[in-house]
Image (tube, grey):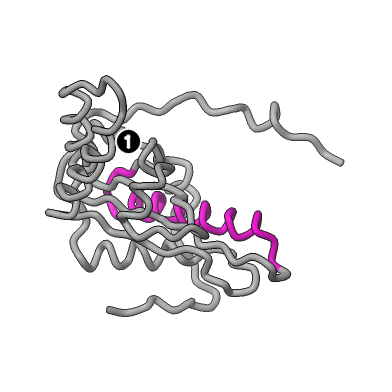
Amino acid sequence: MPDYPATQNIQVPNALDLILSRRSGSAKAMKGPGPNAEQLHRILAAGVRVPDHGKLAPWRFIIFEGDGRTRMGALLAEVAAGAPDISPERLEQERARFLRAPTVVGVVSRLREQIPIPVWEQELSAGAVCMNIVTASHAMGFVANWITEWCAYHPKVLEKIGVRPTERIAGYIYIGQSAAQLEDRPRPAVDSITTRF
C-alpha cells in the first residue's frame, strides 16, 4: 500500500470545516462496519503525520479486529477475575469491552530517554497521533472515540499485549459507525481561555 508522501502547496478544501465538525462518538454506541484494510492503512498513515522532534517515531500501533477483540476480552476478564468480589456481570462487561467497535487501534507511546529530545515532547507527539487518527476517521465517514480505561494501565494487561516497560498506552481508539445520533457538547468560548502577552 502507498505511504502517502507529502505534497507541496496542496490545497485541502473544507479542512477547517472538517475539524470544526469533529466530535467523539461513544464506544458503547458503535456498530459496524469499520474501516477495511485500505481505509485503516490510510487512517494510520494520517496518524503518523505529526510533529516529531528528532524524527524518533516515538509511537506504534496495536490493531484489535475480528477475533483479536474477543481474545483481548478474554484477557481482560482473566485479569479482572483476580479482583476481590468481582461480579459475573463485570466479567461479561470485560469480555465485551473490545467488541463495542469493529476496530480498535491501540496507540503505544514508546519513549527514548537520555537523549536531547524531552520525554514530554515525545508524549505529546503520541497524543497528536491519536488526534490525527480520530480526525482521519471522521474524514472517512467513521466515528471514533479515544479512551484509555483501566486496561491501558494494568501491568498484566500491558505485558500480555506486548507493551514494554518503557512504553505506555496513549489511547485505545475505537472506530466504527455510530448506532445513535451524535450530539455535540458545549465547547469553551475561545476568548475565555485566551490571553495575549
The answer to if 188 sits in the magenta stretch is: no
Label 1: few (<14), some or many (≥20) within 10 Å? many
Instruction: Out of 82 and 41, give the one closest to the viewer.
Output: 82
Question: What residue is rendered at 42% in x and 40% in y?
Answer: 21
Question: What residue is rendered at 40% in x and 28% in y?
Answer: 184
Bounds of the magenta span?
Answer: 117-144
- Name the secondary structure under disc 1: loop
Question: What residue is rendered at 30% in x and 54% in y?
Answer: 160
Q: Is residue 114 left or right of residue 183?
A: right
Q: Is residue 19 left or right of residue 112?
A: left
Q: Where is residue 149 shown, x and y percent of the image? A: 38, 36
Q: Amino acid at mark 1?
A: Gly
> Dominant secondary structure of the magenta stretch?
helix
Image quarter (top left, top right, bottom left or bottom right) of the N terminus: bottom left
Q: Badge 1 is on which residue?
A: 25
Instruction: Out of 183 and 130, give the one closest to the viewer.
Output: 130
The answer to if 142 sits in the magenta stretch is: yes
